Image (cartoon, rainbow, N blue to C red):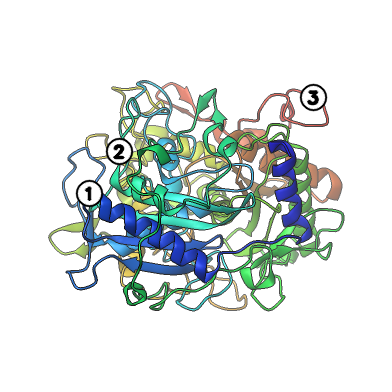
């Protein structure tokens, strides 16, 4: 059987529910035992190894020596940035880092692509490739602040349940986290901290022998990703790095005996002991086939509450209400359906073998960030579900005429008095209004996620060394993926508050205003699961009225842009109710900053599998 057939069968299994896979208790013990053996051979007496399933349930956290002081790690970008700048130089339990790394490996991967935390390191830095001067930032710049522990959307708790589950530190860029595979399907992730550092790789010109990565590589023996999807994915003609080492560099070839008492409880994530993982695609996993109920004729997947109910079936807008111009449930359903149709036609950027359609998640929100619907394709990477919601909320929030005033109301926050605090968010409003104009974020200009992302880079224009930082970014001398600017300062208080494993506040991560809608349950704050700053969303308009946002994530960023933009355009054509993209004169690509136009969306050329059409977004 060749790789193309193998991969297509793996995806088909997800769609049909056949041959579903999960991690067993024996699998978890084997993975951990293999990692413990390598850690011992490398001379590490303590550390943490975490295993998760595909939807983020923590199946076990193993502390190598529980009689020693609990293992800790120091957050560091390696740039010498002192404590007091975001998460830089903060000391945290190593168990949290191991969980974040395992979740990252599981969430970034699919049957068509395998991404590790080393891959993540490549795509969140100020240049892509890292160290390649005067190149734009990483394609997923900002993705590390997703899957947040304070988010209203993410599932949480120690009991095994439906996903996607939260991560204590978002997504990790520290080598030593990988996906785990069985028969070509992602079944979970492995994360390791033994070296005491939670960082990233600034220099990809060499091949490291990172201890965390070596231990994780030993641990995943027997659960490897197919080689073609781990080392052959490209963006902009550049290969993503999966690992700097391989099995030849390991000191061990078998598992060590393990002490089951070393499986430790981590408050808010897992009880002591270990357990089997959920089977992705089942009701219990929280991600299952729609079966044509909401999206007939489409191979859509939806989020389940664990009892057979769609968590985010299309519903009417709360702000504005339908009578005041908001989206009706039928319009929301059409918008999701049209976006999925574009995805099923679109040529995937990050999937192997070539010639597959894009695999994504899509979210729609109203004008105050209330979730109106979420759906997925069968094999979309798990991270994209939360990120699609972040993107939808971000496009809507940035396009509201009240945004500047609402940001100004968020004061400084002394998280660790005298050590770490976030500034008043008015500093970012002042910065953007000084660069863009006095009415920036107050005049209803329509911002796509690409537009706001342009302003969130440590160099503006993006990647050009020696230029001033974007108004939503920290200056480069203190910037790092652990201290980015507005994106982190909005949610850092929520992240810190959840470090003890406490449940997230029902309204979400930020101190921005809550929705005034009288919907079921607590209403979300603006950006309740965080701000996102890489492309893939547009605001939703009815005529010249802003009524919400649509976000897409899971494939290449240009594909995400196209699916959101064209999905909305096509829905407007189908509905004939005035719903569509922002009027061209309202779009942020009319703005010039330092002589450079912002961007709205960027659609790929000749993007479809079934058409030779080239410039598919022009004139829309």
Q: Nearer the viewer, residue 315 or 244?
A: 244
Position of the C terminus by quadrant: top right
Q: Secondary structure at mark 3?
A: loop
SS for callout 2: loop
Please name the residue that numbered disc 3 is placed on.
613
Residue 169 percent location from the top left of the image = 37, 58
Q: Position of residue 427 (x, y in %)?
A: 30, 47
Is 538 left, or right, of 500 in this rendering?
A: right
Q: Which one is nearer the viewer's eye here, 160 or 489?
A: 160
Please give the residue where the numbered disc 2 appears in the rendered image.
Answer: 209
* Mark 3 Cα shell of 10 Å, populated few (<14), some (14-19), many (≥20): few
Q: Of callouts 2 and 3, which one flags the residue occurring earlier in the amino acid sequence?
A: 2
420 and 239: which one is in front?
239
- Which residue is most to the left? 418
| CA separation in Å, label 2 and label 3 | 46 Å
Res 6 visible: yes
**Residue ID for mark 1:** 85
Name the residue located 79 percent from the left edge and 58 percent from the top edge. Answer: 16
Name the N-terminal-most of marks 3 and 1. Answer: 1
**So how many labels did they put on this image?**
3
């Amino acid at each position: 059987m060749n790789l193309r057939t193998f991969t297509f069968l793996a995806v088909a299994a997800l769609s049909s529910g056949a041959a579903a896979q999960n991690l067993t208790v024996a699998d978890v013990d084997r993975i951990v035992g293999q990692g413990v053996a390598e850690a011992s051979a490398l001379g590490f007496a303590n550390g943490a190894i975490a295993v998760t399933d595909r939807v983020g349930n923590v199946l076990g956290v193993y502390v190598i020596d529980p009689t020693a002081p609990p293992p800790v790690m120091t957050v560091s970008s390696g740039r010498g940035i002192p404590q007091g700048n975001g998460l830089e130089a903060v000391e945290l339990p190593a168990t949290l880092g191991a969980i974040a790394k395992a979740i990252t490996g599981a969430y970034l991967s699919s049957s068509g692509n395998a991404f590790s935390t080393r891959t993540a390191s490549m795509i969140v830095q100020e240049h892509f490739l890292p160290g390649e001067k005067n190149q734009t930032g990483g394609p997923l710049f900002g993705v590390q602040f997703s899957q947040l522990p304070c988010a209203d959307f993410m599932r949480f708790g120690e009991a095994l349940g439906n996903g996607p589950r939260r991560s204590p530190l978002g997504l990790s860029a520290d080598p030593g986290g990988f996906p785990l595979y069985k028969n070509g399907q992602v079944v979970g992730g492995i994360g390791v901290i033994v070296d005491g550092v939670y960082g990233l790789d600034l220099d990809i010109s060499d091949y490291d022998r990172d201890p965390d990565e070596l231990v994780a590589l030993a641990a995943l023996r027997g659960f490897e990703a197919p080689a073609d999807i781990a080392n052959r994915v490209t963006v902009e003609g550049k290969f993503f790095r999966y690992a700097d080492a391989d099995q030849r560099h390991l000191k061990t070839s078998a598992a060590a005996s393990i002490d089951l008492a070393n499986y430790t409880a981590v408050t808010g994530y897992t009880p002591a002991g270990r357990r089997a993982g959920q089977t992705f695609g089942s009701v219990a996993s929280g991600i299952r086939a729609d079966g044509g109920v909401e999206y007939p004729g489409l191979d859509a997947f939806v989020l389940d509450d664990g009892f057979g109910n769609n968590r985010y079936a299309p519903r009417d807008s709360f702000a504005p209400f339908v009578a005041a111009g908001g989206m009706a449930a039928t319009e929301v359903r059409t918008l999701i359906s049209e976006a999925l149709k574009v995805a099923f036609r679109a040529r995937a950027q990050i999937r192997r073998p070539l010639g597959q359609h894009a695999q994504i998640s899509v979210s729609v929100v109203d004008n105050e960030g209330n979730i109106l619907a979420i759906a997925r394709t069968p094999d979309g990477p798990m991270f994209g579900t939360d990120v699609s919601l972040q993107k939808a909320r971000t496009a809507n929030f940035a396009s509201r005429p009240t945004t500047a005033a609402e940001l100004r109301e968020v004061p400084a926050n002394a998280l660790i008095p005298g050590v770490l605090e976030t500034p008043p968010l008015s500093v970012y409003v002042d910065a953007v209004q000084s660069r863009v104009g006095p009415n920036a974020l107050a005049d209803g200009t329509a911002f796509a996620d690409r537009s706001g992302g342009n302003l969130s880079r440590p160099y503006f224009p993006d990647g050009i060394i020696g230029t001033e930082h974007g108004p939503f970014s920290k200056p480069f001398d203190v910037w790092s993926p652990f201290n980015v600017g507005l994106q982190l300062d909005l949610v850092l208080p929520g992240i810190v508050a959840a470090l003890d494993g406490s449940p997230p506040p029902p309204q979400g991560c930020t101190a921005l205003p809550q929705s005034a809608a009288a919907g079921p349950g607590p209403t979300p704050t603006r950006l309740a699961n965080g701000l996102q700053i890489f492309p893939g969303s547009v605001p939703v308009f009815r005529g010249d009225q802003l009524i919400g946002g649509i976000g897409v994530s899971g494939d290449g960023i240009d594909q995400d842009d196209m699916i959101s933009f064209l999905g909305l355009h096509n829905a407007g054509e189908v509905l004939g109710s005035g719903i569509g993209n922002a009027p061209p004169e309202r779009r942020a690509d009319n703005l010039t900053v330092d002589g450079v136009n912002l961007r709205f969306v960027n659609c790929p050329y000749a993007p479809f599998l079934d058409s030779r059409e080239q410039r598919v977004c022009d004139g829309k």
